[in-house]
Amino acid sequence: MVRSIQAKGIPPIGYGEGSNKMTVRIDENNMGNMNAKQAEEFFNMVRDDLGLKDFGFGITTAGSICLPDKILIDERDLQYPWHTKHMILHELTHHIAPNAKLHGTRFHMEYANLVLRYLAGVV
């Protein structure tokens, strides 16, 4: 079922030249969140493709992080597939680019390569 936000009492948003309102449509059957199993399956696919056989995956409630032997994804990051996959790739980047300081240029170059390789057009 597709409905307008106007049906929920949310006022219309002005948008574009000559337009006095924009109606945002909400699809009742949206993509939904990834669960832990789906996140791990994506991680395993990327890990295996990168040749990181002994690197692990887990779920935590203490924030997503890259540890020396695994990544932990916070259960709060089990959201829309695009978000969860980005978090997995973000934490993996810390592992494959260990000399990259924090979130600097080198980190972002490696991260962008992973996004291009594993998400471009297939999020």
Image (cartoon, rainbow, N blue to C red):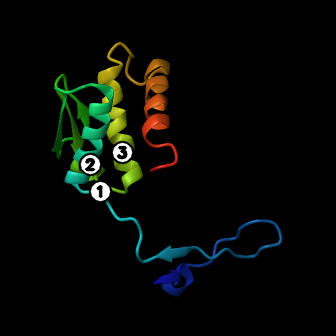
Q: Secondary structure at mark 1?
A: loop
Position of residue 55 measured from the top left corner of the image (x, y, whole percent): 19, 28
Image point (49%, 31%), residue name: 112
Q: Are marks 1 and 3 in contact (CB under 8 Å)?
A: yes
Location of mark 1 (residue): 34
Q: Amino acid at mark 3?
A: Lys
96 to the left or right of 21: left
State which tag comes first along the sequence, 1 or 2.
Answer: 1
Position of residue 85 measured from the top left corner of the image (x, y, whole percent): 36, 45
State which tag comes first along the sequence, 1 or 3.
Answer: 1
Location of mark 2 (residue): 39
Image point (24%, 46%), residue name: 41
Q: Are marks 3 and 2 in contact (CB under 8 Å)?
A: no
Q: From the viewer's perspective, is residue 46 above or below residue 5?
A: above
Classed neighbour count for the residue bearing mark 2: other residues with Cα under 10 Å, few (<14), some (14–19), many (≥20): many
Between the C-alphas of marks 1 and 3, the distance is 9 Å
50 to the left or right of 25: left
24 to the left or right of 110: right
Image point (49%, 24%), residue name: 109
Position of residue 66 measured from the top left corner of the image (x, y, whole percent): 24, 29
Image point (50%, 36%), residue name: 116
Q: Are marks 1 and 2 in contact (CB under 8 Å)?
A: yes
108 to the left or right of 19: left
Q: Amino acid at mark 1?
A: Met
Q: Which mark is residue 85?
A: 3
| Quadrant housing residue 33 | bottom left
